[in-house]
Amino acid sequence: MKILIVDDSKLIHAAVGKMISELGYEVHSVFDGDEAVEFLSNPNQIDVVLLDWNMERMSGIEFLKKNFAEKFYQNHIIMMTTENDPEKIMLALDFGA
């Protein structure tokens, strides 16, 4: 299984990436939504995207909205965030998280 981590924190990439790779999964990393769009536009067969909400160039919700409109990624997207506002969580779910 191939997992893409989309987060602007190098610490998150290191910690989450280590845990995932120790479970035997292949880990790929990018640092914002723009990079994720570019990465996922190439044939790489990512099975799961772990997506941060708060990133500078393109936030997680902006990524979700773009993917919802353009359908460049069809598999699972899981938000990794401290965001706990129920309305924002519902918005993410509405756009495919």
Image (spheres, rainbow, N blue to C red):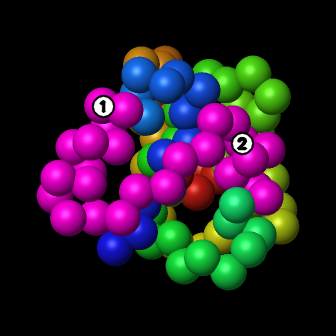
Query: What amino acid is labelled 1 in the image?
Result: Ala
Dot 2: element: helix
The residue singled out by tag 2 in the image is 33
Which mark's residue is nearer the viewer, 2 or 1? Answer: 1
Query: What amino acid is labelled 2 in the image?
Result: Gly
Q: How many marks?
A: 2
Residue 74: image x %, image y %? 60, 74
Q: Is residue 30 above or below residue 15?
A: below
Residue at horizontal 16%, vertical 58%? Answer: 23
Q: N-terminal of the two: label 2 or label 1?
A: 1
Mark 2–mark 1 Cα distance, whole angstroms, equals 20 Å
Residue at horizontal 47%, vertical 20%? Answer: 83
Decide: few, some or many residues near mark 2? Use Cα within 10 Å; few <14, some 14-19, many ≥20: many
Residue 77 is labelled as none
Relative horizontal placement of residue 44, taking residue 72 as reference (left or right) = left
Q: Main secondary structure of the magenta part?
A: helix
Dot 1: element: helix
Quadrant housing residue 82: top left
Decide: few, some or many residues near mark 1? Use Cα within 10 Å; few <14, some 14-19, many ≥20: few
Relative horizontal placement of residue 18, taking residue 60 as reference (left or right) = left
Which one is in front, 78 or 25?
Answer: 25
Which one is in front, 3 or 92?
Answer: 3
Q: Is residue 90 visible?
A: no
Q: Is residue 42 visible?
A: yes
The residue singled out by tag 1 in the image is 15
Please tell me whether residue 17 belongs to the stretch shown in magenta: yes
Residue 20: image x %, image y %? 26, 51
Residue 72: image x %, image y %? 75, 71
Q: Is residue 13 above or below residue 64?
A: above
Q: Which residues are magenta?
A: 14-38
Question: Is the Cβ of the residue at disc 2 closer than 8 Å to that at disc 1?
Answer: no
